[in-house]
Amino acid sequence: MPVALSVEQLETRIGTVQKLLKPLVGGKHAVPCCFVANPSVPGRILSGHPGGSGHTDHRALWFPTFIKTVQCQYFEIWLPSDGEKRWELERAYLSISRVIRQLGKREDILCVHCDPLTKDSDPLASYRKGPHLHVMLAQAPLPRAHFPLNACHLQQVLASVESLTNAMQSAIGIVCHEVICHL
């Protein structure tokens, strides 16, 4: 069963995502979020952003964290089902990078994401359905490896949007305490 919302629930998802991302900014304020209109991506994209308006590329939207040199990117892609009465979560991605200002570049550290609609025939595709971790700041093969965070209870995590959101919230809390705080 796909992780899905009604069109009405999807419209209120912004507040849920803001609450989900709040630990990344130290709980001081909400991360601005909006639906991004990107014609190259089917469905609706809900994205955190640094502020302002007119956003069209969810992959370019990075927001600051409670650590000055760390930025995050978060987005969800929702695909229509049953006309547009129901929306299914295709993916939810949180990427964390360190900004190296003197070099004018960003260094990817890690990514926590899920792809609940994965239909890959690979037996290990279930790793990608639920929240899993990629260690980007490492040598091969680690950046391409999928480290599942909920393998033992994946069906429970994917049973509803709420349970998946709770699993992502737990992962974000761990990332805040175990990674971001130490950068």
Image (cartoon, helix red, strand yellow):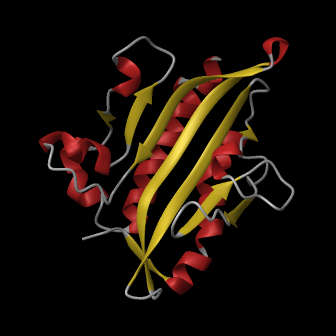
Q: Is residue 156 visible?
A: yes
Q: Residue furthest right?
A: 52
Quadrant containing the N terminus in the rendered view: bottom left
* Closer to the camera in the image, 28 or 5: 5
Residue at horizontal 22 percent and vertical 45 percent from the top: 125
Quarter of the rendering containing residue 13: bottom right
Query: 120 or 95: which is nearer to us?
Result: 120
| Residue 175 drawn at (x, y percent) | 52, 32
Residue 47: image location, x then y, percent: 64, 57
* Tally of marks: 0
Q: Locate residue 70 relative to residue 162 in the image: left or right.
A: right
- Placement of 175 over or under 77, stated as above or below: above
Q: Nearer the viewer, residue 80 or 126?
A: 80
Q: Is residue 55 left or right of residue 73?
A: right
Q: Is residue 94 left or right of residue 99?
A: left
Q: Position of residue 128 (x, y in %)?
A: 30, 44
